[in-house]
Image (spheres, rainbow, N blue to C red):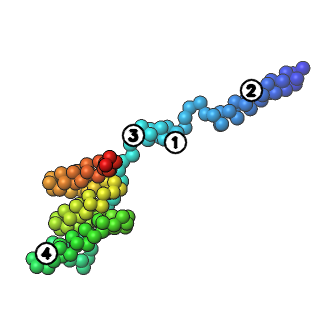
Amino acid sequence: MRTSVILTSVGVSALILAPSLYFHQSFPLTPSAPALAMDETKAVSPPRPRLIAVRPRDHLPVGQEDPSRASAPDHAGYVVERAAELGDMATTRDPAALNTILSELNNPDPEIRKVALVATVDFGSQDAIPALQNEIDWTSDPQEKIDLQKAINFLQLPPAIPNSSP
């Protein structure tokens, strides 16, 4: 009699315990830690990545001369030459050209940075906006921050729709 009672109770508890273990692993009643973390990230926008760790204008590689400290005639020629190169790159639709233009936003020479900003706006790609926002975070010049924000605002504008009426 005792064995039949024990076997019956073990059988009933196994019938109850087996489905509960199966469904608990398949459909957890409480979300797991990764599920909670995922739900929290949906509510909060992800942080903007830093595009550069060290500013080139602050730390030039060893052996590289700072073009802003060159003599006046050499410097003026450098600025004109680089401005022409950046202007030519702005007329292409090559993503590599945009990357080159955006890299010049970190140039130690403020004149080259201004030319690079104009070239970025002329390129007209919204892909440049994160790099411009990153540059706002890094620059200490208030006027440069304003110019960068104006460029971002311009690039965020919708494209012009041509007039379809004759």
Left or right, residue 52 beside residue 31 = left
Query: Callout 1: 10 Å neighbours few (<14), some, many (20+)?
Result: few
CA–CA distance between discs 4 and 1?
Answer: 57 Å
Residue 85 placement, left or right of 73? right
Q: Which of 120 and 44 is in front in this view?
A: 120
Is 161 on the left-hand or right-hand side of 41? left
Is residue 70 visible to us here? no
Give the residue type that dot 4 points to: Ala
Q: Residue tagged by mark 1?
A: 34
Instruction: Check residue 44 in the rendering and tell me which mark sits there, or answer none.
Output: 3
- Residue 70, percent from left and from top: 14, 77
Mark 4 and mark 3 lie on one chain; the one further toward the N terminus is 3
x%, y% of residue 20?
Answer: 69, 30
Above or below, 153 relative to 10 = below
Real-space Cα separation, disc 4 to disc 3, in angstroms: 47 Å
Please identify, in this view, whether the residue under mark 4 or under mark 3 is nearer the observer: 4
Vertical side of 78 occupied by 143: above or below: above
> Which mark sits nearer the N-terminus, 2 or 3?
2
Which element is circle 3 on? loop
Residue 67 lies, in percent from the top left, at 18, 74
Query: Are the residues tagged 4 and 3 within 8 Å (C-beta)?
Result: no
The residue indicated by pointer 2 is 16
Q: Residue 76 carries which label?
A: 4
Q: How crowded is mark 2: few (under 14 residues within 10 Å), some or many (20 or more)?
A: few
Q: Which residue is drawn at 74% across and 26% down?
A: 16
Q: Nearer the viewer, residue 8 or 141?
A: 141
Whichever of labels 3 and 1 marks the residue nearer the N terminus, that label is 1
The three-letter code of the residue at mark 3 reads Val
